[in-house]
């Protein structure tokens, strides 16, 4: 099996919102803001093939589905569908993807499922041969959003996914489509049922898999958020997320599972560390993956 990091459309969002209650003097050192106080963010997907005999894409980024005015409002940089170009560079078309795994259905993680915006055209679903995996709680949230995060969802997307006939709602550690090759962890601090997909590694110790890769989604958007107290203003429950993150990182450190970051513009993959004071960090940072073997 090989792994590719697949860049989608990039985004610029308010640094204060992305770093919650961390002071600007601190987060500006990690992510220098522009004149509008916005920081650069990637929307990076992970491609694995063959995984359980399938070509699997973990998330799709924000895509290019927004009309120009909304693209400007939400800081989407490019007006073309960058994810499709990146897939092609890796040697794949969107029709080649057998499975799309979605951590949740916020537009910056699921918008790439849709074809680029065209004036007067209704939204069109891409990946015509893929099964779409969504957690049960995330599906419930997307179909019945709370007023606080209603704007984070694409209203038409649930109907399109359901009508495709290729939607699998996941409610456990494994899915029917991917079997034991992918292990799911769940978090509720950012949004209910955030589904964190771990590609199971080749080693096992005391029955537990070791040496895999986990898609961190919005539990840990990038390297600065590995520090446990750092959360986003977009998180629905910061204290819960901190507790979940600590448990998550302890587990990945113990099992040597590498972290894959979706929003970090300079790092796709890293290994977890913890210093003598108990602070988590990263090492062996990798900017891009090009047909990298799962060690």
Image (tube, rainbow, N blue to C red):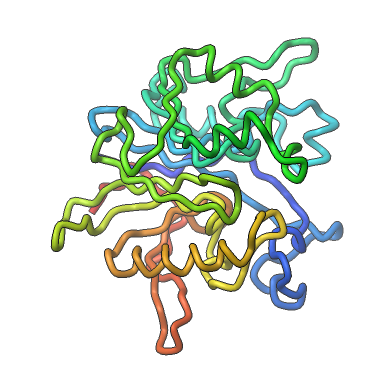
Which residue occupies 42% across, 67% down? 247
Q: Is residue 129 left or right of residue 239?
A: left
Image: 114 above or below 57: above
Q: Position of residue 144 (x, y in %)?
A: 66, 32
Q: Is residue 59 left or right of residue 81?
A: left
In the rendering, at what x and y percent does residue 40 appear? Answer: 69, 54
Q: Nearer the viewer, residue 16 or 155?
A: 155
Q: Exactly how many numbered labels are in the figure?
A: 0
Residue located at (45% from left, 50% from top): 186
Q: Is residue 96 above or below residue 221?
A: above
Which residue is more in the foreground, 2 or 102? Answer: 102
Q: Answer with left or right where residue 122 lies relative to residue 124.
A: right
- Tell me the quarter of the image containing the N terminus: top left
Quarter holding residue 222: bottom right
Measured from the top left, where is residue 41 in percent x and y? Answer: 65, 52
Q: Nearer the viewer, residue 192 or 113?
A: 192
Name the image quarter holding the C terminus.
bottom left
**Can residue 159 be seen here?**
yes
| Residue under the image location 52 percent in, 49 percent down | 217
**Residue 171 on image: x %, y %:** 40, 37
């Amino acid at each position: 099996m090989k792994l590719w990091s697949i860049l989608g459309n990039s985004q610029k969002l308010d640094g204060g919102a992305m770093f919650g209650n961390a002071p600007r003097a601190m987060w500006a050192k990690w992510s220098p803001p522009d004149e509008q106080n916005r920081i650069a963010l990637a929307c990076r997907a992970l491609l694995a093939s063959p995984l359980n005999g399938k070509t699997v894409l973990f998330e799709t980024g924000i895509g290019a589905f927004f009309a120009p005015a909304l693209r400007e409002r939400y800081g989407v940089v490019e007006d073309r569908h960058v994810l499709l170009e990146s897939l092609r560079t890796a040697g794949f078309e969107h029709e080649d993807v057998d499975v799309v795994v979605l951590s949740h259905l916020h537009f910056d993680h699921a918008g790439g499922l849709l074809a680029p915006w065209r004036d007067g055209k209704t939204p069109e679903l891409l990946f015509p041969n893929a099964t779409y995996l969504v957690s049960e709680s995330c599906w419930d949230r997307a179909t019945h959003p709370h007023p606080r995060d209603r704007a984070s969802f694409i209203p038409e997307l649930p109907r399109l996914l359901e009508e495709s006939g290729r939607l699998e709602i996941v409610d456990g550690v494994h899915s029917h489509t991917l079997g034991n090759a992918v292990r799911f962890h769940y978090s509720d601090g950012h949004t209910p049922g955030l589904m964190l997909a771990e590609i199971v590694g080749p080693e096992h110790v005391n029955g537990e898999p070791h040496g895999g890769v986990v898609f961190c989604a919005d539990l840990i958007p990038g390297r600065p958020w590995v520090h446990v107290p750092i959360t986003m203003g977009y998180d629905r429950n910061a204290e819960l997320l901190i507790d979940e993150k600590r448990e998550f990182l302890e587990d990945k450190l113990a099992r040597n599972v590498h972290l894959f970051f979706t929003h970090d513009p300079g790092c796709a993959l890293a290994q977890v560390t913890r210093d003598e004071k108990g602070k988590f960090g990263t090492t062996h940072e990798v900017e891009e993956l090009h047909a990298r073997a799962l060690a």
